[in-house]
Image (cartoon, coloured by chain):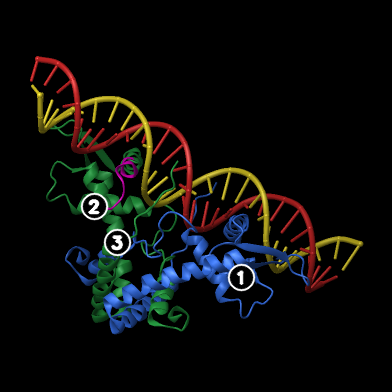
Chain colours: A blue, B green, C red, D yellow
Amino acid sequence: MTFDENSTAQQVFQAFMRFRRLNWLNWNGTGPKPSDVRVLFCIKNHEGDHAMGMKLSEISQCLHVSPPTMTQLIKDLEEKGLVRRTVDHSDRRIIRIRLTAHGEKTVQQARETVAEAFQGLVDFLGEEKSRLFSSLLSEVVEFYTEHQTQLEREDH
Amino acid sequence: MTFDENSTAQQVFQAFMRFRRLNWLNWNGTGPKPSDVRVLFCIKNHEGDHAMGMKLSEISQCLHVSPPTMTQLIKDLEEKGLVRRTVDHSDRRIIRIRLTAHGEKTVQQARETVAEAFQGLVDFLGEEKSRLFSSLLSEVVEFYTEHQTQLEREDH
DNA sequence: TCTATATAATTAGTTAGGCTAACAAAATAT
DNA sequence: ATATTTTGTTAGCCTAACTAATTATATAGA
């Protein structure tokens, strides 16, 4: 079988295996968790077009997680004082999420940390390879997005 | 800040964000879990140089997880009849792990599934790009391996 | 030979990061 | 007015790890 013979597919697979355990958000085990950071980034990045704050469901879609997952994440961030929840004026079902001042500061710090780390990677790889890598990775994502296996959970 | 200005670092970061949720082992929610598959592959790949079976700790090192984690994984696989545990003759502390016939068959099937999926990816990207991608990904892993942040857990 | 130290694996408890099913409240459609 | 849809929540569950402490065994040192 070609998978055994140091084929390209096998090489890519091995590269994936090595990649999967990387702590690429540079989390040190304290402070905002990686998932916190992703939520905060998402909110921050959409402040321009969501003056009233993003809907909870919009954030869940943005990060490709389910609404209940996002409910829990936002609850935790609210308890930490990083976000504020408000009910939308025109539709009381909708919960809008905004950063607090503390959240703004946390995002800023996280951004600097992440920017620094990724700049380090770009410096290591070089500009050209980094762009190439990013582009290839996007193609990989494209492939899997089109071929993603649907989870079949066992009946309960 | 350059991270905001569609810089290369930001592009790589965004590519990572999109990549992280991919189900690249093509798990459909039933059958051996992704972690099971990785353990089985590890055992299978080392059968040549570990006639008596790999030590539990060797598998944990191979997959970069802690021994207690591997203890639990092996326990589960043993219960499922996929592996067999034996005490080493020359050192009774050592537990050696081998595939059962059922485990062999499961590995074979998993390999075929994974091989097919990765071949699909290689076909999609093309041979040259796939090799390039694999090589770049290995460089990325190299970077992070050298710059990995150590987790600082809070004192209990 | 005996004691101290090191090693390999295990147990228990915990955390991070998800998911689904069911439900409640609100909005919209009929 | 009732039925249906939408938005978010709650509860329970799963996967995939980690650490601290412990036990059994092997090795080192006196």
Task: Using a 10 Å C-alpha cutoff, classify the residue at mark 3 as few (fewer than 14 neighbours), some (14 to 19) or many (20 or more).
Answer: some
Q: Tag 3: residue type?
A: Met
Chain letter of the residue beneath label 3 in the structure image: A
Task: Using a 10 Å C-alpha cutoff, classify the residue at mark 1 as few (fewer than 14 neighbours), some (14 to 19) or many (20 or more).
Answer: some
Q: Between residue A95 and residue A17, name the one nearer to us.
A: A95
Q: Tag 1: residue type?
A: Glu
Q: Which residue is mark 3?
A: A17
Q: Is residue D29 left or right of residue D11?
A: left
- Can residue A63 be seen here? no
Task: Report the number of numbered marks.
Answer: 3
Q: Which range of residues does the magenta coloring cover?
A: B63-71
- Where residue B90 is drawn, which disc sits there? none
Q: Residue at 23% across / 73% down in the picture? A: B135
Q: CA distance from mark 3 to mark 2?
A: 11 Å
- Where residue A58 is drawn, which disc sits there? 1
Q: Between residue D1 and residue B63, name the one nearer to us.
A: B63
Q: Residue at 41% across / 73% down in the picture? A: A115
Labels 3 and 2 within one chain: no
Say which label, 3 or 1, has the lower sequence index: 3
Say which element carries label 3. Answer: helix
Residue B90 pos. (x, y %): 11, 32
Say which element carries label 1. Answer: helix
Q: CA distance from mark 3 to mark 1?
A: 32 Å
- Where residue B62 is drawn, which disc sits there? 2
Say which element carries label 2. Answer: helix
Residue A147 pos. (x, y %): 42, 71
Chain letter of the residue beneath label 2 in the structure image: B
Do labels 3 and 1 touch, CB within 8 Å? Answer: no
Chain letter of the residue beneath label 1 in the structure image: A
Q: Is residue B3 above or below residue B42?
A: below
Q: CA distance from mark 1 to mark 2?
A: 40 Å
